[in-house]
């Protein structure tokens, strides 16, 4: 075991039109959501061998995250974050995942830039 900081692979700004939210108009009309996923992965084996099979294929990961983002609607960003984290942790090479979901078009009734929920999940 090492005490060095974990290696990180990030996919940031993954964007899709989706229908998440508690309000009927959100479900009906949808809006833009953006996801940032930061994975903790030991990249040393891949770096030593130059072998994609020994690390996370971030193009494949992006496709799986996009499928969840545009898939079955949920009420809460917290639920969406959990589903996205589960996708990341399904890869046995991923030790932990930090997921941020941005909802910049949320209806707050006041001016704002963004609403986000961030979670971090790791293997036991």
Image: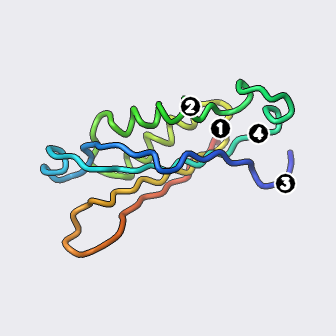
Q: Earlier in the sequence, mark 4 or mark 1?
A: 4
In the image, residue 57 lies at what x, y percent? 62, 31
Q: CA distance from mark 2 to mark 1?
A: 8 Å
Query: Around disc 2, counting alpha carbons within 10 Å, would you say few (fewer than 14), some (14 to 19), or many (20 or more)?
Result: few
**Is mark 4 in CB contact (under 8 Å) with mark 1?**
no
In the image, residue 114 lies at what x, y percent? 36, 65
The one nearer the camera, 118 or 10, is 10
Count all numbered tags in the image, as a single digit.
4
Query: Looking at the image, which residue is at 35% across and 43% down?
Result: 16
Identify the image quadrant of the C terminus.
top right
In the image, residue 38 lies at what x, y percent? 59, 49
User: Which residue position holds label 4?
Assistant: 43
Query: Around disc 1, counting alpha carbons within 10 Å, would you say few (fewer than 14), some (14 to 19), or many (20 or more)?
Result: some
Q: CA distance from mark 2 to mark 4?
A: 17 Å
Q: Residue furthest bottom?
A: 110
Q: Earlier in the sequence, mark 2 or mark 3?
A: 3
| 29, above or below 67, in the image | below
Q: Which mark is residue 3?
A: 3
Q: CA distance from mark 2 to mark 3?
A: 25 Å
In what element is the residue under mark 1? strand
User: Which residue position holds label 2?
Assistant: 90
User: Which residue position holds label 1?
Assistant: 94
Query: Around disc 3, counting alpha carbons within 10 Å, would you say few (fewer than 14), some (14 to 19), or many (20 or more)?
Result: few
């Amino acid at each position: 075991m090492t005490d060095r900081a974990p290696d990180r692979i990030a996919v940031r700004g993954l964007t899709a039109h989706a229908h998440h939210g508690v309000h009927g108009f959100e479900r009906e009309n949808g809006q833009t959501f953006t996801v940032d996923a930061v994975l903790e992965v030991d990249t040393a084996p891949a770096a030593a061998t130059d072998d994609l099979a020994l690390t996370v294929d971030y193009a494949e990961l992006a496709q799986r995250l996009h499928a969840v983002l545009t898939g079955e609607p949920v009420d809460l960003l917290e639920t969406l974050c959990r589903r996205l984290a589960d996708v990341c942790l399904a890869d046995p090479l991923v030790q932990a995942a930090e997921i941020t979901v941005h909802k910049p078009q949320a209806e707050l009734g006041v001016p704002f830039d963004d609403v986000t929920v961030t979670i971090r999940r790791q293997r036991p």
